[in-house]
Amino acid sequence: MALALIKTALRKIMFKKSLLQVLLTCGAVAVAGCSSHQANVAEEMKNDRGLAQLALESGRPESAIGIYRKQLKLQPNDISLLLALGSAYNQVSEFDLALHHLNKAQSLLVTDAGKSDDMSESSEIRGQILREKGNAQQGLGQVKPALADLKQAVELLPDDAKALNSLGINYALFKDYHHARTAFIGALANEPENLEYRNNLALAWILDGQPQQGIDVLYSHYLRGSSTSKSRQNLALAFAMKGDVEAAKTIAKQDLTKAELENNIAYYQQLQQQLLQPLQQVKQ
């Protein structure tokens, strides 16, 4: 009888031990499964963000916004995500929404500044946020705060062509064409083949009453066939300002309807008359 009781007690002990082992094993599997799921989610989010970047670069910002908004629900305090979403909203001219997300990113960056060991990375992100904030404010007509933010952005990102170009545009809005040209020249130094920056530089000369300098910036690209519609119209305007209406007509007609061309020619002729008036007064 005693022997039977001992055997029963031993079986119970062995059962408890094996049960504990099973529970521990299951727990380890559950933890491993959870960790694997988290890794898969992280990888999926990384891939989706790459797709969003491709969408932005291919001119489909709406697709990028959809991806970013979905991710933001899972990571509402992700600074790089808020920056990317703000930048995408700028591209579709949703400047209020862009500014909302960029302000949040800036606030979070200030909070996290003391926690980060990589100050260079923090400065780069701060510069990018300020650049996009400046663009959003510019779009909303808030040119003074935009100028302040864009100046800071260029200080932090002196080789950022986008920031320099945006700063140049903002200076031009204040009719400060000298500083505008300096900024556009800086943008071109970093991206010499960018036709938008080149056109902006030429326009800063033309609007400053120096059409020949504008022609010098644009004409060689026009001859090579690498000009854009905007740059051709600015080139035509520069020739008209110099009094060469025929050259202006030849260039302008490539992109305009008959009615648009007639309106432009009338304007060019007005410019020509304005240029001739001082000469006629001198002759008299």
Image (cartoon, helix red, strand yellow):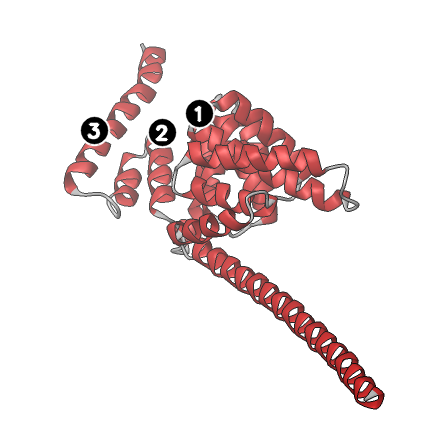
Q: What is the x, y in percent for residue 121?
A: 71, 46
Q: What is the x, y in percent for residue 214?
A: 45, 36
Q: Residue at x 42, y 57 (%)?
A: 58
Which quadrant would the N terminus be assigned to in this image?
Answer: bottom right
Is label 1 in contact with label 2 (beta carbons under 8 Å)?
yes
Reply above or below: 53 against 209: below
Extreme residue toward the front, this view:
1
Q: Residue at x 59, y 46 (%)?
A: 78
Q: Residue at x 67, y 43 (%)?
A: 124
Is label 3 in contact with label 1 (beta carbons under 8 Å)?
no
Front-lying residue, 215 or 83: 83
Q: Which amino acid type is shown beneath numbered disc 1? A: Gly
Q: Quadrant of residue 273?
A: top left
Reply above or below: 20 against 279: below
First in sequence: mark 1 or mark 2?
1
Q: Which amino acid type is shown beneath numbered disc 3? A: Ala
Residue denoted by label 1: 209
Q: What is the x, y in percent for residue 221?
A: 44, 51
Q: Which amino acid type is shown beneath numbered disc 2? A: Met
Query: Regarding mark 2 in the picture, which secondary structure is present there?
Result: helix
First in sequence: mark 3 or mark 1?
1
The numbered mark at residue 266 is 3
Query: Regarding mark 1 in the picture, which secondary structure is present there?
Result: loop
Q: Quadrant of residue 145?
A: top right
Is residue 8 among what the camera can see?
Answer: yes
Q: Residues within 10 Å of mark 2 (few under 14, many from 20)?
A: many
Q: What is the x, y in percent for residue 66?
A: 41, 51
Which quadrant would the C terminus be assigned to in this image?
Answer: top left
Query: Regarding mark 3 in the picture, which secondary structure is present there?
Result: helix
The numbered mark at residue 241 is 2
First in sequence: mark 3 or mark 2?
2
